[in-house]
Image (spheres, helix red, strand yellow):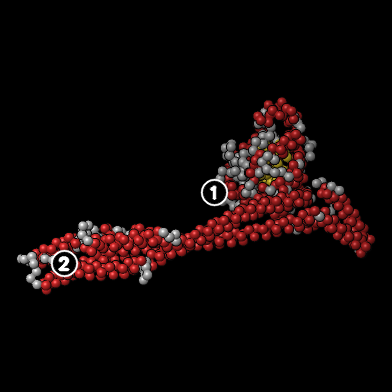
Amino acid sequence: MSHDASLSFDWAHRAYDAYCAGLPLEVREQLRKPAGEAFVVLYGPTQVGKTTLILTMLQLSEDGHARVGKTLRGKRSKGESSTAVATQYRRSKDEKWSLSWQGRHITASSDEGMANELEQLRRSMMEGMIEASDDYCTINIPLSYFKQREGEKLQKVIRILDLPGIEADNAQEKEYVRAISRKFVPIATLTLLVSKADDLGFFFKGLEGVPEIQHWTHIPSRFRVVTTYSFTPETVRKTVKKKQGNIKAYQQELIAQIGTFGALPERAKKEDLYYPLEFGTSWQESNLRKDTPALDEMIQQEFKRLYDDIAQADDPLNYLLSVLDSQGCAEAFYEERSKVLNDEINTVRKKVESSRKIIASFNERLKEVKSQVKLYEEKLGAVQSLSKKDGLISLFWVDYKKRQELDQKAMFDLLQKKQWSVSDLKKFTTLHTIEKREEKPEDEKALLPWMIFQYNSWLYESREIFESGNSIIDKTCAHFFDVLPSAEDLLHDGRLFILNNFQDFMNKLDEYWINSYWSDESYQQDCRMFMSAYRNSAAKLKEIIRQALDVEQKRFEEKIRKRKDHTESDVRILGIQNSKRELELALLQQQFEESLAQKKQIDAEWVETKEKTDNMHSFFLNEYFKAVSSAYETVYTAEGAGMSLLSLCYAQNLKYSRSVIEEKLFHQ
């Protein structure tokens, strides 16, 4: 922005400060004023020719360019980053090299001496001796290495800060680059983003993680895009003959290609911001340069335009142009934040919905498991009830006792009725206490078969009672009677037990010498002995059945109880998991509400910011009218005609400065 140096723009600076003060922090950071002396920062990946670009713009001679380039490598091989630290190159006042760094000033009288110093500088950086807060290095290049043109007025000295390649191969160097970028890029008047023409993705992907630069499209007036090796690739040479020296065509194509890697707002599509260049030995010696003089002339013109662009960076009003990008910058930041929040809201909303479904599923499962617990409680109660007073097992033993008493009475009556001989009594004992003989009358059933019959009949009748029902109690009890062992399984050793129990009685009968009893008393004694063995055997068989029933019932109850306990454990686990899920849901809902509130807040902030940016012109008008009013007030209140005249001239000066601002900033 060229202007009359005598004009006063203090009011415009105040307007700028007042306007920026009300903008969001991230926008203010992008619009920050340069600190102190204006300068330009060069930023890009390693090995794209940044240092060579600077040396070309410094107007080095052909021989000087080669010698300086070799010296600045600091004995590094080609293909390796040559810039060790952030460096500013300048024309020396004499024929000596000099290096200013960290308060030290080193001079060298030869290229070899300076190369050694630069090698040591890189070694210090790689060994961690350079902190990220360190200042940049200044190198003065011997005067004889520059082009000498007699009678030509010296051009304005440009100040460009060359940063090390951001893809440096050393971790310490990378950290240094990140830190030095944080320090200098925000306060630079202009930043040149440099990359090869075949690596245009760098202008988006390559800038991630460097917030000072990655938002360059929001505030494009403070950046310039420079591509190197723009015309020598085979893919480009085919179109060069058609375009020749048409810079607009190259710029438009470059903008279109960069736009394929990310969104470019309209203000970032201005052709003047883009510089497709070729330089260095490879270009000087290329056949393409010789065959297309119009292209070579165009490149020289672009270098001159870039030089002028950089030279004007020293203009203290230049940064005022960035105010024109403020609304686009604020809107871009708003859209980025809004997208992040909308994505977060949608993500959290899906998580809330998913969490609710999971909790509903947990509740349904919990309900089912609790129902199972209740079911097992009913099953357990049903089985336990069988042994209670009115239960089938208790009733079985009541009936069993009655039938046993009747059986024993019938047996005693049978003995009294028959009045057997010793041999008949022995035969009866052998045959009719162990097994039933089908040809014998029913009342002569043997002890063991009778008990088997009664137990099995009870099992069969009990199963029939419950199998006809549909309730859980009926099914549980039916299953219980299904798994009970049969009497044959319980009493398979009963025959041997009865024989052993009657052994004393049989031995006594074997001791008789005669078959007939001499007296009724003797017979009655044997009958009583028989009945004693009979009762003992019946009691023993009953105890076997009772123990078996008790064991089987306890085993059956234990199975149900284990399943119940396991299910209750599932209830506890599900309850804990459900509580955890409900807590997660509560946190998600809180996060969702906070995100909604935050979205509402940034929406309101954007409305306020947009209103401010829409009224940007009014900030400058207000400050202008304040300054003019103050000047005219001084005209009338100043003591002496001289002071009044000076104030009047100042008011006129303000009028002219406003015209400049209106034209440059607001095109009015």
Residue 165 percent location from the top left of the image: 62, 43
Query: Which amino acid does the dot numbered 1 rest on?
Result: Glu
Q: Secondary structure at mark 2?
A: helix
> What type is the residue that disc 2 sits on?
Lys
Name the residue beneath numbered marker 2: 418
State yes or no: discs 2 and 1 in contact (Cβ < 8 Å): no
Q: Nearer the viewer, residue 345 or 169?
A: 345
Left or right of residue 645: residue 498: left
User: Closer to the N terminus: mark 2 or mark 1?
Assistant: 1
Q: Nearer the viewer, residue 487 or 577?
A: 487
Please provide percent x and percent y for residue 580: 53, 61
Badge 1 density bin: few <14, some 14–19, many ≥20, Cα 10 Å: few
Q: In terms of image quadrants, where is residue 521?
A: bottom left
For the residues labelled 2 and 1, the Cα–Cα distance comes to: 123 Å
Disc 2 crowd rating (10 Å Cα; few below 14, some 14-19, many 20+) is few
Which circle, 2 or 1, is nearer the viewer? 2
- Using the image as rendered, state which of residue 309 and residue 360 is in the foreground: 360
Q: Position of residue 144 (x, y in %)?
A: 69, 37
Side of 223 where 541 appears, left or right = left
- The residue at which mark 1 appears reads as 127
The residue that appears at 63% across and 47% down in the rendered structure is 208
Examine the rendered structure and indicate whether residue 424 appears above or below residue 228. below
Q: Secondary structure at mark 1?
A: loop
Residue pictured at 20% horizontal, 59% vertical: 440
Whether residue 309 sits left or right of residue 561 in the image: it is right
The residue depicted at 39 percent of the width and 61 percent of the height is 465
The label number, if any, that marks residue 329 in the structure image: none
Query: Looking at the image, can residue 51 be seen?
Result: no
